[in-house]
Amino acid sequence: MKKNYTFSEVRNIVENMIGKTFGELNNYKISSENYNKGSFGFIMEEDVFKYGKNTKSELDIANLNIELKMTPYKINKNGTLSAKERLVLNIINYMTEYKNDFYDSHFWFKNKLIQIVWYRYEDNKPKSDFLITDELLFKFPKEDLPIIINDWYTIINKIKLGLAHEISEADTMYLGACTKGENSKSEREQPFSDIRAKQRAFSLKSSYMTQLVRNHVSNSSAERIITDIDENISFEQIIENKIKKYRGKSVIELKKLFGINSNSKNVNELIVARMLNIKGKVAQTDEFIKANIIPKTIRINSNGSIKESMSFPSFDFIKISKEKWYNSELYEMFSTTKYMFVVFREVNNDYIFSGIKFWNMPNSTLNNEVKDAWSKTVEVIKNGNVVKDIIGGKKFSNFPGMADNSVCHVRPHARNANDVNTLPIPDNKTGMTEYTKHCFWLNSSFISEIVKDI
DNA sequence: GCATGATCATGC
DNA sequence: GCATGATCATGC
């Protein structure tokens, strides 16, 4: 049974939720151990707004065009806030959504007005005790809408190309297409290919929700790169327009131009910030945080090769040994992160800035080569088969190397060899219970291929 | 010159 | 003190 509301009724209801726990709202009808993923939303729909569970593809409060969303955030060790999850919106109907323009899309129909209610997630606390702390009747801010629109078209264009099965959350900036439904049975048909594609939903990325919660709940904001709002220009084009006049200039020239005296390793980072007219760090700008874009500097040798492979955060041997691929840290990272490669080419002992490329791991590569390297790594750890040999004090491992995989390998990444993580079972050969921290690296040859035309 | 182990440097 | 981006060092 659906009810009509006025905006002020909705306002009152939502404001009354703040400061209450889920247990209080629900009169403790759901016992703490019986909470599941859907409980938080269900309590809002059932106990607060008092209408039946809404599983249909219609708006929660149809007469006001409002969709209701309950979403968690957490407090980090350093006191900042982060969204705990992406905000999952409507499922993408591959067979129909591509026929629309943005403003007549089902996405826009469902999500142009979202009543967001935030609760504070805390580890080791009964779910019924989670506290509701904030709310916002959310409309896409005018500075974000152009990017959302571009994201929507990026997803739609992949459907039109018959590549719905190749969609990755990292293809886009703020609006992602996240998988929904955990097994292969949740695959759907797509209009321009016979290959079945994973069911996906539009979502606001975790990184976007993090920035939103920081803005709204803790009132902190970040420096912005985009100054002119124009939905006909993509973010990548905006960046290209800003940096193109510096292409071909050497690091020495650029340092002079921007008045940078530093010789430290992060000098290239400073140069890029100046090109984009940013005072702080590029990675800390509003756009980069929201879109989860990580800048990486790449130096190409005069012979065209790249000397160094690219490192990522080290992994926890115990954690990774317990993971399943689709919820592994590595899968999560590559399926949601976009990278901005800043390319410098070596010429006469100086480095020439040659351009910028945005990149994210293609789905097929992720689920083939990367998955393969990950699986082998997990096997090695689980079997206690870590150490291959120790020669002259150097430990050689059985982890996948460059020769085993065309995309990535596993190597140490630590302060020194004594900087270790604990192994889940002792190593067969040496009995070691801990081992130098390791991480996945993208092979230099793989990166070479990506940036060869930059 | 490449593959792989090891470590430096910076910033929070 | 630690995470992370970046790079060095060595042996084949």
Image (cartoon, coloured by chain):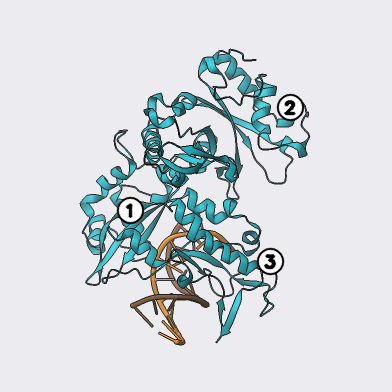
Chain colours: A cyan, B brown, C orange
Name which residue lies at 53% across and 51% down: A332
Chain under label 1? Answer: A
Chain under label 3? Answer: A
Q: Would you place residue A401 above or below residue A158 in this image?
A: below
Residue type at numbered disc 3: Pro
The residue under label 2 is A26
Number of numbered discs: 3
Disc assigned to residue A357: 1
Q: Would you place residue A129 above or below residue A448 in this image?
A: above
Disc assigned to residue A19: none
The residue under label 3 is A424
User: How far apart are the alpha carbons under marks 3 and 2?
Assistant: 41 Å
Residue type at numbered disc 1: Lys
Position in image of residue A178 (x %, y %): 51, 41
- Of label 1 and label 3, which has the lower sequence position? 1
In front: label 3 or label 2: 3
Position in image of residue A35 (x %, y %): 72, 36
User: How far apart are the alpha carbons under marks 1 and 2?
Assistant: 50 Å
Position in image of residue A42 (x %, y %): 67, 28
Of the 4 image quadrants, the one containing the N terminus of chain A is top right
